Image: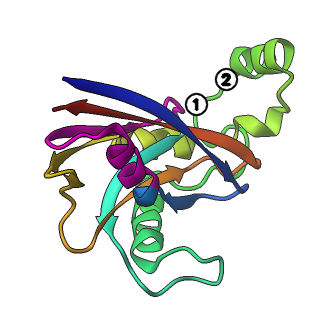
Amino acid sequence: MIVASRSLVVATPARQEFFDVTDEVTACIAESGLADGVVVASTQHTSCCVIIQEESEDVTYYGTQLILQDTLNVLAKIAPPTRNEGQYLHPGPIHIENAATLRGEHPSWGLNTDGHIISSILGRSVTVPVQAGQAVLGEFGRIYLGDLDAVRDRERTVVLTVMGR
């Protein structure tokens, strides 16, 4: 039985954006020697997601694939982008005070409730079958980390875990 994991750190901008991590997942599978099993890609960040989506050759001016921008556009109708305090119940004054006191966070960094809601809809992990040493993603499938927190540049982590034989 093979069980191996590694972390991937992705620098993200202060806007909602997706990052293709498929090549890193493929490399993790190859380096582990896994022939058959699963690979799990997950993130611990509660305003991020990990999804499988088709690769769309066309991109926005920012370089976001159109299918991924369409996804953000649709989800913005469900959870509109946070523009000011009081738009959502979260974060409340206790959360803002604790974030400032305990973590040195600026109050505006709390304007990310939409990212948390979208993350809970899309999910923070995917499990992909591995057969004959290859991730089973279909002809166009790719694995993406989505940073849905648009308030600041930061680094996000994806944990890759392979299991099987």
Q: Is residue 122 visible?
A: no
State yes or no: discs 2 and 1 in contact (Cβ < 8 Å).
yes
| Residue at 22 percent of width and 60 percent of height | 137
Q: Which residue is mark 1?
A: 89
Give x and y (percent) for residue 79. 47, 51
Q: Relative to the observer, which residue lies in front, 10 or 89? A: 10
107 sits to left or right of 94? right
Residues shaded magenta: 24-46
In the rendered image, the vertical position of residue 88 relative to residue 51, given as above or below: above
| Residue at 69 percent of width and 18 percent of height | 95
Mark 2 neighbour class, 10 Å CA radius: few under 14, some 14 to 19, many 20 or more = few
SS type, badge 2: loop
Kindly indicate the quadrant of the structure image that contains residue 70. Answer: bottom left
| Residue at 20 percent of width and 74 percent of height | 139
Q: Is residue 93 magenta?
A: no
Q: CA distance from mark 2 to mark 1?
A: 6 Å
Q: Relative to the observer, which residue lies in front, 4 or 105? A: 4
Point out the image quarter for the N terminus: top left
Q: Which amino acid, mark 1?
A: Leu
Give x and y (percent) for residue 101. 85, 13
Point out the image quarter for the C terminus: top left
Mark 1 neighbour class, 10 Å CA radius: few under 14, some 14 to 19, many 20 or more = few
Q: Which residue is mark 2?
A: 92
| Residue at 57 percent of width and 82 percent of height | 60
Give x and y (percent) for residue 54. 30, 71
In the rendered image, the vertical position of residue 2 relative to residue 63, given as above or below: above
